Amino acid sequence: MIKKLLRNHNLKGWLYLLPAILFLGVFMVYPLVDVFVYSFEEGYNSASQTYFGTGTYNFSYVLHDPYFLQAVKNTLLLVMITVPLSTGLALLISLGLTSIVRLRGALQTIFFLPYVTNTLAVGLVFMILFKKTAYSDGLINLLISFFGGNTVDFIEGPYWAKMFVLCFYTVWVVLPFKILILTSAMASVNPVYYSAARVDGTSRFRIFARITLPMISPMIFYLVITGFIGAFKAYSDVVALFGTNLNAAEMNTIVGYVYDMLYGDSGGYPSYASAAAILLFAIVLTITCVNLLMTRRKTL
Amino acid sequence: MEDYQKIERTAEARRRAIRAVTYTLLGLWAVIVLFPFYWMLLTSVKSYGSYNAEYVPKFFTLSPTLQNYADAFTAVPLGRYLLNTLVFTAVTTAVMLVVITLAAFAFARLDFRGKNAVFVIFLSLMMIPNELVIITNFVTITDWNMRNTFPGLILPSVTSVFYIYLLKENFEQIPDNLYLAAKVDGTSDLRYLLRVMLPIAKPTLVTITILKVIECWNSYVWPRLITDDEDYYLVSNGIQEIRENGFGRENVPAMMAAVVVISVPLIVLFLAFRKKIMEGVSRGGTKG
């Protein structure tokens, strides 16, 4: 009887799944196949929907495009700087947060605020703070000159200055998530270990290195991996700071390159966009796998 | 005895010093986080004239004005952007909830041939980055003549494999006996889903809703690709448009007023549902 009640669902099951399957099929599975098709169609014209032939020309075009190489350089720099920096900072801040009692809740709330803000909107505030204009040097530059440094236009000035703002803003944006994950990981460490350590008179640093760090290391690796993936896909925070014409600003990212190829003044080349997107995916996949392998070796 | 007290005292002094350093550093970061918010609020109530007259910007203002907010709503269609975003967010979230609830119910409760295979395929789709499929979606929506329409904006983001997974896990914790009892009473599956499962899974549904609302409110890339008519801009595109063409480039206070208007709804939502949001994000959110 019970068996019968539960078994008779073949059609019904598929019916309940139908909307999800339809949407995923049209907007995920089909595009996934199609992006590879696009990337091998040479000379595709989106107006007439024709192409000359198939081959790897799109990839070689993208790989030789100076804009793409600039985008790769920018993205790699951003990843190399912000991932270790933000993870380390988040670790320090979480450690501080868990060691205090008073004001902890309030500080946690404040630290989480950037997560719920519109990246584009707050990016504009950062731009105003760092920008040098005809009538004002901007707050940050005034601070720099107050301490006796040379002012610099962080938004339209030298490359390192622009990179600095971008990294700063990226860290500002990604920290809330990391702090949240690390504080909850630290809170879930069994307090018995700490009590035992205290009885033995273990120093603070040793407690951190021998108890806290090993206990939360899975979460740190998780944050490093998601951090890598996220930083490789940086785009909207870059737009927020430097505007939509990123190639001119020399601040384009790989994802920005994909969208520029697809749409806008330089757009209309879905084949190049597809090739670039696949290259990005390959890079991210490789790095994730390397990370996972390293994690495995460390834990074994 | 005296030695012991001395040791106690130095230990206490050390603890105090460490605590002072901790609070100082945490306070410093709190200032860095809060300062941009303070600055946008402050700038948004400075008058255009006084803002531009300050070579060294002041950290307070004695004559706050709301003129910039009036400008933000009249000189550029900020109200329109807000309305569009509201419609987009509400419809996308509502449709997504229906789609994922049905799918999660099928996976958790119904038994049918091919279920496990489909579930594995669904899970593997979680690894596909948005950047890879957005190119074809752009072409698809363009071919369907859906650029600058709400369906074009909404359709590609009404499913989320991750949320289906999250909800399925939650549904599976509901004991089978309830389902069998309902079946014996002759309750239909749909009725059981609506009357029993949804109320029990409400906390998870609320979490998913909040995360999706945040995502919708901040979405920028897809709306930018699919709309070039100002009537369909969402707030993110609107703020970009304001930055590049609105108010004349130099009216920073009016720009900041627009930024405040865009930021406030999410911040209010966050303060109201602080616990839920932080819990939800630590379970399933990613950003950055």
Image: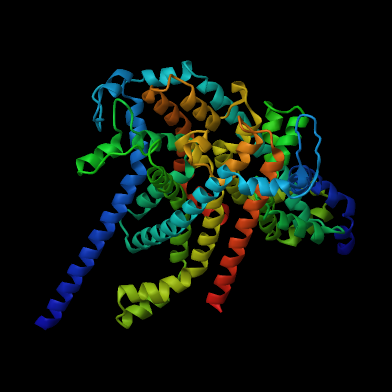
Q: Is residue A194 above or below residue A5?
A: below
Extreme residue toward the left, this view: B2
Q: Please give left or right for residue B16 compared with residue A126 in the image.
A: left
Q: Please give left or right for residue B67 compared with residue A231 in the image.
A: left
Residue B77 x/y as whole percent: 52, 19
**Residue at the location (26% across, 30% down)?**
B57
Residue B220 x/y as whole percent: 57, 36
Position of the N terminus of chain B by quadrant: bottom left
Residue nearer the viewer, B248 or B154: B248
**Residue at the location (46% across, 73% down)?**
A214
Q: Please give left or right for residue A152 compared with residue B224 in the image.
A: left
Residue nearer the viewer, B179 or A29: A29
Q: Is residue A222 above or below residue B142?
A: below
Q: Is residue A180 visible?
A: no
**Residue at the location (35% across, 51% down)?**
A107
Q: Please give left or right for residue A133 compared with residue A283 in the image.
A: left
What's the image's color scheme?
Answer: rainbow
Residue A232 x/y as whole percent: 55, 51
Extreme residue toward the top, this view: B74
Residue A157 x/y as whole percent: 38, 38
Q: Is residue A105 visible?
A: yes
Residue nearer the viewer, A163 or B241: A163
Q: Is residue B275 above or below residue A260?
A: below
Q: Is residue B225 above or below residue B199?
A: above
